[in-house]
Amino acid sequence: MSLTPHPATAATPPLHTSHLLRRTTINRAFAIIYASAILALLYYHLLTLRHSTTFISSATTVILLVADIVLAFMWTTTTSFRLFPTGRKVFPENLGKFIEKKDFPALDIFICTADPYKEPPMNVVNTALSLMAYDYPPEKISVYVSDDGGSELTLFAFFEAAKFAKIWLPFCRDNNITDRCPEAFFRSNGITFSDGAKIKSMYEKMRIKVESVVERGNINPEYITNEDEQIVFNKWSKGFSRHEHPAVIQVLLESRQDRDIEEHPMPNLIYVSREKNKASPHNFKAGALNTLLRVSAIMTNAPIVLTQDCDMYSNDPKTPQQMLCFYADESIRHNLGYIQFPQRFHGINKADIYSSEYKRLYVINPGGMDGLKGPCYVGSGCFFVRRVFFGGPSSPELPEVRELWPDHVVKKPIKSQEILDLAHGVAGSNYENNSSWGSKMGFRYGSLSEDFFTGLHQHCRGWKSLFFHPRRPAFLGDLPITLFDALTQNRRWCIGLLEVVFSKYNPLTFGSRFMGPLMGLAYAHNAFWPIWSIPIYIYSFLPQLALLNRVSVFPKVTDYWFLLYVFLFLGANIQDSLDFMLAQGTFQQWWNDQRMWFIRGLSSYIFGFIEFSIKRLGIASKGFHVTNKVVDNEQSKRYDNGVFEFSVPSPMFVPLATVAIVNLVAFVFGILQILKGGNVNGLFGQMFLACFGLVNSWPIYKAMVWRTDNGRMHRSINVTSTLFGLTLYMLVRLVPNA
């Protein structure tokens, strides 16, 4: 990347600062104490196993030992985030001391979409408009929209967006608007500004036109206003489908030619739909991003690349200046590969019932990795140095075509025939054949979690990254408002993470060798998500079923070993809740986060592992699932009221309902034993777990029994879960009391 900084002096103010968080020392001390307690627990299991006299007691101890080993491993990976938690501040007001505005580096922005019915084009348009309106020289911004669904509906939406942008960008600039996503702006304060009502009316007309086209499934000929548009849409012939079509690259705005209504240059806006055919692998989102990487190199080749999800809009027009506070610093620039901003979301209900904010994944853990070699790449809100996609800091891996090199300077207009021909060529379905794309260059193939996999490779090659969490969220996005969509999204991630674990790039082995043990453990925390299902399933069933058979699996309350269990349980949960609330969460949100961890362990984690196993066996699976971004009004009302949605008869709900039934029966059985005067001293731990499961299953009980709305549990799930519960009860009654 080429920057021309002003000469630095001793009095030059800083661009950024960093500091370890105040809780660092406490975290380290607690880690030593807690690790000692874990070792004591493992010793207790071995002691119990040594004194076991029957097969049943030995098997029970071994199963609990396995569960606790997994919990200990995952605690160890979590601790890696707590040893060097780092916070950062930036001072964009000092940028002028280092670099003039005319020397700001160009910025290529990548937005990916794949399905106009699951990812409404107006959402994508709002994302693009918010990014085009950055407080940044417009001639240095190029927005590339990858439409992997190859939909004329999406292209039509962007023809309309290009017209509206010529009015929207000067409106934002003249009024110093902060909310530059039109939908977000008009939702809050649209008519309080000069011409606000007029601009809103124009936006509404565009929205109605686009949504009517999507609803019809085709473009009304009256909406095609000129011959150039007609020529483009003629490409959607009878043989054109989302799986079989030629490359379509359409320049909608060119900064050299197009001007807004105040005669300021417009950013470049380019629609890209790569060539698709069923005979060539397309590598899902990673393949689309690599196509954008090549097409943008041919057309603009900006030294900095921002990747952005189609449902996440810019919430702060000054974000690029915050990014430049790091990239303009020569002392860290030589191996700085990317800067990750956290993913934040709007429209979250007060309790965040599905824990869709993923506060640990997007805020807490990246801050912990920032004190090491930097955070993982999480797919959106990330500013890359283009050079990071082509080898290590001192060992470049460059493409054969000179025009794709990161230092190539584009001199010809992006609408020139030569440029367009080259761009179509690199967007071909066979372009990557026998090449290093996806393995040594670009975004990495081999995992549905291409963001995680790409960040891992870049760190292993010697690049560092930074995490910056501004007070005002840089980006805001949509989130799933139904349990099924939330779990489906998580299941897809789990499949991708397992693809990394069972490859030669396992973070514990490959990662630790190249990044160091702490970074290896940090990456392993995410990669091994699915194994949470092991202890969750064991502790959701085994103690409760043993309770029904009056068999104790934990120490008696009067036993000193019982205090060890109390310390381990309270210590982990108290520390986790403090981390959560220090990250501006509430206790209620933390509790729901714990509930969703429990629910994911019983559903998406295990189902992701099953689907991954089927895929590894060579059996066809469903492949990539696009998360649904379409909002149903009734579902939205239930979500806003904090009511769980179970309307889809998904098999992922069967384990949830079965566990709810088993825990309820076990808890009632224990209460009856107490009322009968039985000695529950040795069964208290199991009673507590059954009660814990019962409380966490409260939304499930309501959905199974007395809810009457459309979000209730489907009858087939109730019947199947009851049958499973009865089967387990009958099996446990056959086990001799030993």
Image (cartoon, rainbow, N blue to C red):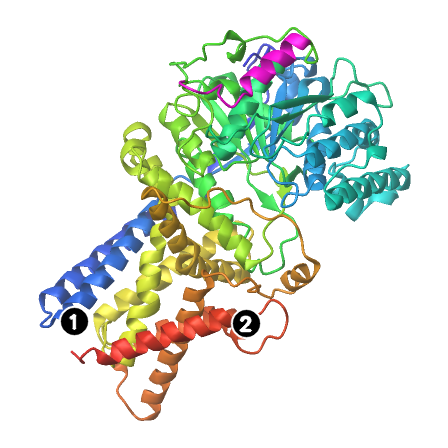
Q: Between 504 and 583, which is closer to the camera in this rendering?
A: 504
**Other residues around mark 2 within 10 Å, as few (<14) / some (14–19) / many (≥20):** many
Residue 700 in the image: x percent, y percent? 50, 70
**Element assignment for label 1:** helix
Question: Which of the 4 image quadrants contains residue 147?
Answer: top right
109 above or below 536? above
Amino acid carrying label 2: it is: Ala
Amino acid carrying label 1: it is: Ile
In whole angstroms, how far apart are the C-alphas of marks 2 and 1?
A: 36 Å
Q: Earlier in the sequence, mark 2 or mark 1?
A: 1
Question: Residue most toward the bottom?
Answer: 676
Number of the label disc, if any, that sits on residue 451:
none
Residue marked by disc 2: 703
Answer left or right for 312 relative to 182.
left
- The answer to whether any part of residue 301 appears in the image is no
Answer left or right for 62 relative to 170.
left
Q: How many marks can you see?
A: 2
Residue 720 in the image: x percent, y percent? 43, 71
Residue marked by disc 1: 56
**Element assignment for label 2:** helix
The span shown in magenta is 417-434
82 above or below 263? below
Q: Between 90 and 688, which is closer to the camera in this rendering?
A: 688
Residue 585 in the image: x percent, y percent? 55, 54
